Amino acid sequence: MIAVEEVSSSFETLTLAEKIDRLALVAVRVGLNLQPGQELVITASLDQAPLVRRITDHAYRAGAIAVTTLYNDDETVLARYRFAPDTSFDHTPKWLADGIAAAYGSGAARLGITGVNPALLKGQDPEKVSRANIAASKAMKPAMELITRHAINWSILAAATPAWAKLVFPHLHEAEAVPALWEAIFYASRITGEDPVADWKAHGQSIARRVDLLNEKRYFALHFKGPGTDLEVGLADDHLWAGGGGECCNGIFCNANIPTEECFTTPHKDRVNGTVTASKPLSHQGTLIQDISVRFESGRIVEANASAGQDALRKLLAVDEGASRLGEVALVPHGSPIAQSGLLFWNTLFDENAASHIALGQAYATCMREGESMDEEMLAMKGANASLIHVDWMIGSGEMNVDGVFANGSREPLMRLGEWA
């Protein structure tokens, strides 16, 4: 659980509303680094309105010209699966997807607030869930390409919701679980110090030093070895490591994830071989997928199993040709605050920052030298994967060792028992 000495005494005296306001400040100033005259598009659930309101306040104080929030609601999502005609699951409103892409294309910043019920679609027809996700991914592809190429400043953070809180703290009543989850979010998001903006700057500099070292090494591959895992991940030609904050193509420095503890890069889509077992469950589009175990050959998953959510996993891998290949590999020390909290968040934003991880699907063009200027064909020639999806899942633990492998076959320890070597 959270160590008391990690939280400043002044933070403990704040009310919940004041703490949420501090998180909103960090979202605008650190996550987005929102600029005067920018528009901001927020996506959130109705349960997260208190945080949205505080973010909106800080956005306008930062000079935002317009803030637009697109809300979703669990009950209306479920209504579709209960009552909609079958054709509904192959349809996504194109006008909405086009509008979002137009907003990003005109320079609007994007802020996603996560925290919806991870088990919302448990018990729903996996076929319908898969079709709905594919339709949404196709419609949103133009907008998401602007995100994956970091054309604009964007960020994701979390807000506690009752359903999510009960999953993280099943032994607590809702009235206790929601405040407990909020406190865990505040701690993981590094806002408990006297000056969270300055703390984030120092944290970013620490990650940047590690990124610089990894880029100097020019590894050909990474070799992961741990319980149920013996995996070699080849790295794309001209790959670049990234982590923490970075400058977007619009010249604005932002932190895409709050929290963040990872250093990540682009694997080669055809050079991944071996077996790997997930160290944490994956919550994907309302379905919980547990105990994932897969085998790669020449970059592609050829065997996949899960103790729960098996149908959802297989449908995910079948979305398109690139869905069964890797688009990201990331290193996270086991000593990260999220890992040390001892919590399973059932939320990728948090759990991926508690453990080293891999991501199925789309690669980030920004993790390639001059990748932003390359088209999809040129990126593929360098080894970058393309897909409608990008789904992270965790493989690291306190028992995982990682070696850096050079082009001549020599190797050196990179992580031992989950910590940097």
Image (tube, helix red, strand yellow):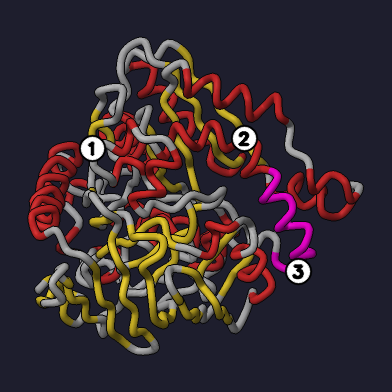
Residue stretch in magenta: 122-135
Residue at image location 41% in from the left, 80% down from the top? 276
In this rendering, is residue 109 above or below 233?
above
Sequence order check: which comes first, mark 3 or mark 2?
2
Vertical order, 39 against 258 (above or below): above
Given this view, does label 1 or label 3 mark the residue nearer the observer?
1
Q: Amino acid at mark 3?
A: Gly
Using the image, tell me which numbered label, if any, was put on residue 123: 3
Label 3 packing within 10 angstroms: few (<14), some (14-19), many (20+): few
Q: Is 82 left or right of 122, judged from the image as shown? A: right
Q: Residue at x 44, y 66 (%)?
A: 393
Left or right of 71, for residue 211: left
**Residue extending farthest bottom:** 227
Q: Is residue 44 above or below residue 282?
A: above
Q: Secondary structure at mark 2?
A: strand
Amino acid type, residue under disc 1 in the picture: Gly
x and y percent of residue 68 in the render?
A: 54, 22
Q: Find residue 130 and report its horizontal and vertical position in percent.
A: 70, 58
Q: Quadrant of the N terminus?
A: bottom left
Q: Amino acid at mark 2?
A: Tyr
* Cβ–Cβ under 8 Å for marks 3 and 2: no
- The label shown at residue 71 is 2
Say which mark, if any, is on residue 246. Answer: 1
The kind of secondary structure element at disc 1 is strand
Q: Earlier in the sequence, mark 2 or mark 1?
A: 2
